[in-house]
């Protein structure tokens, strides 16, 4: 068997990374603006909106492993994972537009429409994004080259976040001419069109190189058994749940924080843009830090430092805007190196599973990991809606002291504690540099002499 080329070209890295820009157009519109859109534009209650997001996530979680298993068993002239990127792009784009469309239904009708479109959008997102994530693990078998590829991926992804968090409201105002509902819908037309172009580029420029052993027979029972016996993967799944509860909670609450606590609704975009720039600036540190200290140690340090500074955001008063920005920038820069490393470690855990069992199930490993992360995302978004309701939040009104406290906790103390707790779990992750080097040597030998 031909030896796998570990090195990836600049063109392939950039082409692959554009798929994450396209993914972030939807992921961040949902994460940053959908709860706000439901309550303050479409007129759904915070409790109902939070429940919709949780129910949709549970459906999303149920579909993830199915997509992982099916993609692992897909055989086409384009590979296992690339076809999903090509054929999933149009449904993804159409459903993104429909989710941010506001037909004039009654209260119950609005809830049903919002729930149905959100469920379908998350299904389309999973169908394209799970194979996309798994694709990065089969483009190369070198852990540090994967870290580099994932760095490109998340720089491009955070550029997508930069656009969504920094321009979405401005675009909605421009396209809406005073009609927020129309503005959001037209903004999604733009993002959906760009997504189609970017996904096509990803499909055209990438190649799958790491293949399962030729003698491997399909056995879902064996693959699931190996997955849950893989301690490294289990730890990463737990970390994914906890960290994504944090992300969802904070992202969903930040618009409320600026509108109702700081009284500067329009400045939330600037805050998000500066935070995203901080992420992009610090992301390239991921690969050199991983080579120096190891993937696990960098992730632990990132969790502790960024979690602390997220918690500190609770302290500044309404007029102390500069301190809020400084704490957020430090937190985001400390958090950035861990982002690509989480996905690198998931790929390494798939290698570890093959190394130990002789079976490879890349799609299942990634779908199950994303399943856990989406569970966290759904729980976090739902908790945000419920805490707002419990705190007596009322849309488009002056908030009580209790509601303001709830909003502040959602963007600072609660997510900070959750992210710091990830460091505890990562202590038990044991795939170090010595192990990854030995895995590569052994797996290369097996592929050359099957």
Image (cartoon, rainbow, N blue to C red):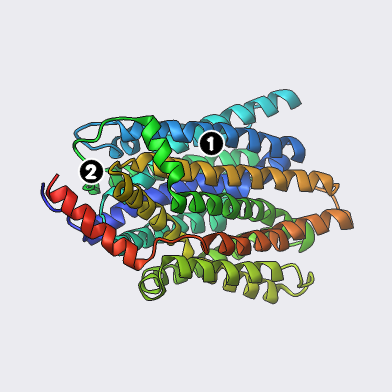
Q: Label 1: few (<14), some or many (≥20) within 10 Å?
A: many
Residue 51 vs residue 210: left or right? right
> Tag 2, which secondary structure?
loop
How far across and down, in percent of the image, does residue 409 sit? 75, 59
Query: Can residue 342 be seen at all in this image of the molecule?
Result: yes
CB under 8 Å between discs 1 and 2: no
Residue 426 vertical placement versus 129 (above, below): below
Residue 406 vs residue 217: left or right? right
Q: Quadrant of residue 219?
A: top left
> Tag 1, which secondary structure?
helix
Any mark on residue 100, and which? none
For the point 57% across and 44% down, the residue is 30
Residue corresponding to mark 1: 61
**In front: 196, or 150?**
150
Residue 148 vs residue 279: left or right? left
For the point 59% across and 69% down, the residue is 304
For the point 43% across and 40% down, the residue is 367
Mark 1 or 2, nearer chain start = 1
Residue 103 vertical placement versus 339 (above, below): above
Q: Label 2: few (<14), some or many (≥20) within 10 Å?
A: some
Residue corresponding to mark 2: 211
How far across and down, in percent of the image, does residue 151 sit? 38, 62
Where, quadrant-wise, is the C terminus in this rendering? top left
Cα separation between marks 1 and 2 = 26 Å
**In front: 426, or 155?**
426
Query: Can residue 88 be seen at all in this image of the molecule?
Result: no
For the point 25% across and 58% down, the residue is 440
**In front: 202, or 233?**
233
**In front: 381, or 401?**
381
Nearer mark to the viewer, of 1 and 2: 2
């Amino acid at each position: 068997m031909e030896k796998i080329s570990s090195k990836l070209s600049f063109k392939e890295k950039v082409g692959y990374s554009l798929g994450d820009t396209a993914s972030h157009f939807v992921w961040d519109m949902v994460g940053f603006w959908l709860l706000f859109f439901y309550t303050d534009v479409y007129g759904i209650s915070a409790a109902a909106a939070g429940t919709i997001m949780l129910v949709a996530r549970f459906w999303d979680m149920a579909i993830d492993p199915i997509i992982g298993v099916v993609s692992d068993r897909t055989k086409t002239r384009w590979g296992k994972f690339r076809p999903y990127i090509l054929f999933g792009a149009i449904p993804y784009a159409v459903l993104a537009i429909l989710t941010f469309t506001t037909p004039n239904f009654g209260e119950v009708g609005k809830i049903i429409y919002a729930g149905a479109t959100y469920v379908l959008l998350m299904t389309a997102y999973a169908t394209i994004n799970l194979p996309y994530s798994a694709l990065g693990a089969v483009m190369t078998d070198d852990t540090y080259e994967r870290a580099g590829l994932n760095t490109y991926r998340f720089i491009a992804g955070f550029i997508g976040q930069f656009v969504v968090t920094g321009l979405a409201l401005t675009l909605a105002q421009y396209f809406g001419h005073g009609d927020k509902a129309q503005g959001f819908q037209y903004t999604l037309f733009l993002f959906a069109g760009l997504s189609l172009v970017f996904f096509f580029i990803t499909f055209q420029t990438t190649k799958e190189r790491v293949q399962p052993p030729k003698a491997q027979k399909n056995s879902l029972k064996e693959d699931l058994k190996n997955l849950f016996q893989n301690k490294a993967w289990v730890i990463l799944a737990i970390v994914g749940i906890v960290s994504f509860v944090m992300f969802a909670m904070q992202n969903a609450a930040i618009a409320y924080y600026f509108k109702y606590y700081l009284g500067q609704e329009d400045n939330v975009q600037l805050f998000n843009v500066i935070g995203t720039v901080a992420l992009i600036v610090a992301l390239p540190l991921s690969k050199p830090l991983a080579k120096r200290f190891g993937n696990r140690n960098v992730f632990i340090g990132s969790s502790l430092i960024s979690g602390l500074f997220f918690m500190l955001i609770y302290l500044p008063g309404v007029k102390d805007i500069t301190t809020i920005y400084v704490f957020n920038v430090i937190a985001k820069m400390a958090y950035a190196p861990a982002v690509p490393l989480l996905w690198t470690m998931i790929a390494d855990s798939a290698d570890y599973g093959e190394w130990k069992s002789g079976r490879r199930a890349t799609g299942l490993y990634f779908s199950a990991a994303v399943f856990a992360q989406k569970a966290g995302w759904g729980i976090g978004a739902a908790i945000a809606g419920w805490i707002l309701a419990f705190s007596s939040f009322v849309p488009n009104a002056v908030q009580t002291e209790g509601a303001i406290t709830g909003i502040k906790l959602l963007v600072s103390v609660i997510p900070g504690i959750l992210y710091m707790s990830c460091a505890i779990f990562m202590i038990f992750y044991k795939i170090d540099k010595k192990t990854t080097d030995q895995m590569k040597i052994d797996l290369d030998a097996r592929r050359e002499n099957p």
